[in-house]
Image (cartoon, rainbow, N blue to C red):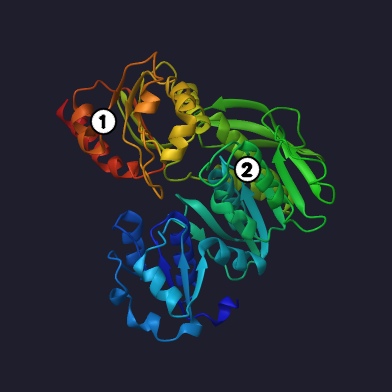
């Protein structure tokens, strides 16, 4: 469809990270934007402050009348998390409106630009955010749709009508990334995940190979060097690998931690670029930065911009987000919701803050993921010194009989652990001696961030 002919955009599930990016994008282009979400939260409140009209009851009568008057000039966007019985969704479907999934709209936008797509079961938000910052601060500029709020911009979207470049986070959930039209792509990982969509690891790897197939002939593919990507899939592409080790086309050399920052040189197929400084903690973020730097280098960003702009990247909300660091207490919030991500997060804390007791609060995300990875979650969480385990956040899923957080708890053997609810958490925390506290999860655990921060501040003031 021709998005230029659209005057109004209505989003069902507007408060999701991907949907809110589309809302901001169309709002920045001067379209009228409105939407529905289940509850008011900080992200929807910010959208309302930016001029997006939002309500929180699933009632077609609450849809602003301007959005129901001209079907040809109104676009309806919905997220796969919206249930099939949703009244507003069915109103639009039954009355002949143009109704598209979020991925389809992003695919249409990518068709009109030079698209740099960032895919992977882990790491794609960090890589795409660093990449977008590197491009945005260069002469080329860029547009970007990101899976997190970048602190430099306090937004998950960048809009630059003068730039033809688009950085798109390529989401494998619901096979959404197969709607994109990438010209360049990076793949960070292909671990088993989203097993409510993919039956097994082989199935998800097949989908990633289909994603590679969407690149044009002589398009550019960059991928982590240990991924099982077939030679057949890359036969007609310009293909490069990256790693944190010296066994790839792009990798860091002379890596060290100095004054709380990673410093390294970037080895490329043609030359070595010296003196990069990464302000983000965690060795995994070095790998993410190498991926972003490598794709930006392949896209033609000059070396001076790469040096300067990596140093000025301030990070992403809920990605190793240090929220409280006073005297003896440290509090970090992280989006980690897969066993591999949890292990990386805890390892990064130990590397940057050695010798400290780590208390972790984890909220499992999805019944299916908990059922499949219960043992792996326990193995990763046992890298903590102490665990507080919350109830499962169901997101889009109905309960599965016999599946609860207890499945993970049953495998915890080597550290003190307790189960509790969100409601009771603050009472559990009240009497604990804390050195390093980390909250982890992809559900609504972020609603606990402010209460925890306030509790820590009150403790400090009463000492």
Circle 1 — which element? Answer: loop
Between 373 and 19, which is closer to the camera in this rendering?
A: 373
Q: Which of marks 2 and 1 is nearer the N terminus?
A: 2
Q: Please give the name of the residue rendered at 47% of the width and 37% of the height, measured from the top-left corner.
A: 369
Q: Nearer the viewer, mark 2 or mark 1?
A: 2
Residue under pointer 2: 204
Q: Work out whether 408 lies above or below 161.
A: above
- On screen, residue 235 versus residue 380, left or right, reads right
Q: Is residue 165 visible?
A: yes
Farthest top residue in view: 414
- Label 2, label 1: how many angstroms apart (C-alpha)? 33 Å
Residue under pointer 1: 420
Residue 95: horizontal and vertical position, in percent? Answer: 43, 80
Quarter of the image where one finds residue 46: bottom left
Q: Please give the name of the residue rendered at 28% of the width and 41% of the height, measured from the top-left corner.
A: 448
Residue 316: horizontal and vertical position, in percent? Answer: 46, 45
Farthest front residue in view: 401
Residue 306: horizontal and vertical position, in percent? Answer: 65, 47
Q: Please give the name of the residue rendered at 23% of the width and 28% of the height, measured from the top-left corner.
A: 429
Farthest right residue in view: 235
Circle 2 — which element? Answer: helix
Quarter of the image where one finds residue 86: bottom left
Q: Work out whether 129 lies above or below 321.
A: below
Farthest left residue in view: 462
Quarter of the image where one finds residue 81: bottom left
Between 239 and 180, which is closer to the camera in this rendering?
A: 180
Q: Please give the name of the residue rendered at 48% of the width and 71% of the height, measured from the top-left corner.
A: 26
Residues packed near mark 2 inside 10 Å, few (<14), some (14 to 19) or many (20 plus):
many
Q: Can residue 303 be seen in this view?
A: no
Q: Work out whether 105 lies above or below 252.
A: below
Residues at marks 2 and 1 touching, judged by CB atoms closer than 8 Å: no
- Identify the image quadrant of the N terminus: bottom right
């Amino acid at each position: 469809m021709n998005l230029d002919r659209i005057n109004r955009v209505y989003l069902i599930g507007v408060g999701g990270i991907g949907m809110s990016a589309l809302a901001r994008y169309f709002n920045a282009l001067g379209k009228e934007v409105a939407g529905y979400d289940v509850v008011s939260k900080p992200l929807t409140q910010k959208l309302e402050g930016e001029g997006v009209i939002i309500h929180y009851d699933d009632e077609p009568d609450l849809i602003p009348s301007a959005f129901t008057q001209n079907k040809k000039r109104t676009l309806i966007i919905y997220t796969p998390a919206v249930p099939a019985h949703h009244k507003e969704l069915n109103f639009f479907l039954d009355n002949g409106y143009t109704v598209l999934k979020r991925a389809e709209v992003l695919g249409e936008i990518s068709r009109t630009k030079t698209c740099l797509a960032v895919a992977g079961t882990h790491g794609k938000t960090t890589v795409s955010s660093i990449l977008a910052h590197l491009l945005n601060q260069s002469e080329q500029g860029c547009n970007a749709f990101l899976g997190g709020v970048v602190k430099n911009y306090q937004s998950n979207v960048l809009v630059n009508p003068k730039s033809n470049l688009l950085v798109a986070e390529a989401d494998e959930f619901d096979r959404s990334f197969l709607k994109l039209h990438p010209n360049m792509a990076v793949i960070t990982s292909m671990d088993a995940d989203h097993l409510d969509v993919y039956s097994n690891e082989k199935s998800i790897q097949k989908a990633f190979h289909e994603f590679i197939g969407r690149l044009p002939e002589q398009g550019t593919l960059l991928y982590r060097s240990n991924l099982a990507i077939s030679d057949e899939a890359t036969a007609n592409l310009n293909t490069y690998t990256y790693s944190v080790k010296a066994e790839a086309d792009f990798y860091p050399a002379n890596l060290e931690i100095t004054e709380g920052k990673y410093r390294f040189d970037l080895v490329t197929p043609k030359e070595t670029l010296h003196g990069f400084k990464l302000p983000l903690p965690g060795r995994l973020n070095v790998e993410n930065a190498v991926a972003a730097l490598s794709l930006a280098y392949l896209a033609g960003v000059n070396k001076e911009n790469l040096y300067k702009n990596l140093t000025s990247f301030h990070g992403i909300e809920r990605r190793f987000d240090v929220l409280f660091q006073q005297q003896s207490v440290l509090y970090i919030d992280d989006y980690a919701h897969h066993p591999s991500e949890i292990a990386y997060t805890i390892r990064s804390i130990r590397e940057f803050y050695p010798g400290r007791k780590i208390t972790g609060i984890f909220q499992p995300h999805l019944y299916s993921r908990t059922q499949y990875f219960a043992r792996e979650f326990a193995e990763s969480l046992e890298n903590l010194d102490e665990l507080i385990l919350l109830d499962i956040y169901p997101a889009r899923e109905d309960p599965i009989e016999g599946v609860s957080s207890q499945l993970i708890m049953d495998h915890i053997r080597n550290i003190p652990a307790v189960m509790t609810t969100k409601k009771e958490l603050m009472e559990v925390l009240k009497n604990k001696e804390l050195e390093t506290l980390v909250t982890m999860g992809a559900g609504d655990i972020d609603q606990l961030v402010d209460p925890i921060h306030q509790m820590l501040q009150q403790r400090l003031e009463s000492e």
